[in-house]
Amino acid sequence: MSKLRILTGPYRGREKTVTDKAVTIGRDAEAGIQILDRAASRFHCEVFPVGGMWFVKDLDSKNGTHVNDERLTDEELLRFGDVIKIGTTELVYESGNALSDEDSSSRISYSDDPEVLSNTLEFRVDELSDLTEPQEQHQAGDNAKGLRILYQVSRLLSDPASAGLHEARVLELLVQAMPAECALVFRREAGSGKLVPATVRTSAPHIQPVISRSIIKKTFTENKALHSADARDDERFEKHASITLKNIRSVVCVPLASGGTTRGVVYLSRGGIHQPFDQFDLELVSACAIQLGLAQHAEEERRRHRAMLDQMVTTMVRALENRAGLAGSGERCARAAIAVANALRLAPEAKERLRTAALLHHFPWLADDSPKSTDSGVLKRTEKAEELLGGIRDLDGILPLVRLANERLDGSGPLRLTEAELDIDARILAVAAAFERGQQADPGRDSAEVIEGLFADPGLDRQVVGMFQACHLDGSLYLA
């Protein structure tokens, strides 16, 4: 099986399994995969099967469809890892099944009945801790359940491997553990200002969520956690009639804040044979939403800080390169290293670390231009460079990799490290640095010839060099 996963945009993280039918991608709600991108046409492109393989074609869209940054001019065969780009939205073609029922967002229907608020309890989020306990204390089982859910949410949010999927996985957990028929996150759309579903999870594929716009709007605008049970007084039912007979439908809706600002809401619905949500559930979902908001804010701050660090390092390297007559060397090395890292599908954290290390691969020579060609001289240069960069705390995890830029699999590098001591990051960096040095030594030499020369070097990983060659052939080695 294979699937399409949205990498960027309002529906980031949403997945769809592709089976035996063509799937359209576009802005229209009727598209197989809906994306909210201004550059997207209503039905922008189509992914379709032929003989067990999957192809993508543009549907005469206004702005075109790109695969791996190349504009489609005809039908294109998709390989695992290929990225389809529409405007600023990217989707990746991967193996496996979608994580959950991603079609559920297209089956959402809305209820605008304002009377639902008459059966709704509301609390400001900052007032939840002041609520008086009911006379009947929560059973130990409820408390244990709450602790278990909070623990599992914390584990999900702290897992770097699930970065970008935190929201979807938290909703999946809530659907299973609360339990709930559906769990959704609504966020304000930048263009229209409307609250739109960003992530949707349902307990079964056939479930069609019915969403109360009144509850969502009130939760968002007034920053209040709401708990509603759609239980009308009805004399036809006895006082102790079962929940099943009454068919009570219950909703919990809580604000989702990030950085002190309400960005959306978390909405859970339950019905059928289940007991309605109670105050305990309201507080539990509110606590989960607080954790999710904090995690999202931390991730936004991390990305912002990372961008600032990258800009600072790039500016510093450019200034030193201009003085040394090596303009663009660090960025070329970084581009090449990231192209190979993308082809090998390294984790985002590994790619960030590798990019910065590649930018700084020649920093020891930029910081000290005295002639020292011996291994001891290289080590002294490196130590001096580490002293200069050591004051930048965020580079602590980068400098050890920079030190390995000249190490070789045959143990002939300055530190005499061998193949078993060099991980994939170090091997990629070594090949990228060697490729850049080869181009510097003879600027007029064809890149393909430089790469052929790398194959003959016993100190470089031949598989990594082979990946460099593949990236050279498809052009990704030179993409900004």
Image: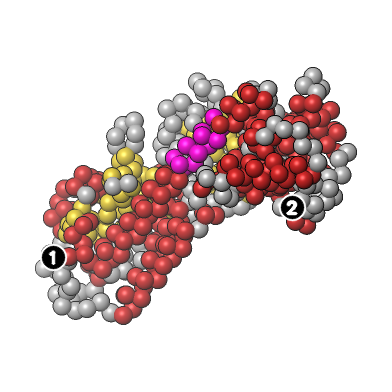
Instruction: Give the colour scheme shown.
Output: secondary structure
Marks 2 and 1 sit apart, C-alpha to C-alpha, by: 73 Å
Query: Which residue type does callout 2 highlight?
Result: Leu
Main secondary structure found in the magenta portion: helix
Please give the residue where the numbered disc 2 appears in the rendered image. Answer: 422
Please give the residue where the numbered disc 1 appears in the rendered image. Answer: 234
The circle drawn on residue 305 is none
* Any part of residue 93 in sight: no
Q: Position of residue 383 (x, y in %)?
A: 66, 46
Q: Answer with left or right where residue 365 lies relative to residue 129.
A: right
Q: Answer with left or right where residue 14 lies relative to residue 47.
A: left
Q: Position of residue 385 (x, y in %)?
A: 63, 41
Q: Which of marks 2 and 1 is nearer the N terminus?
A: 1
Q: Answer with left or right where residue 453 lies relative to residue 104.
A: right
Q: Secondary structure under badge 2?
A: loop
Q: Give the range drawn in magenta.
A: 303-315
Q: In which quarter of the image is residue 240?
A: bottom left
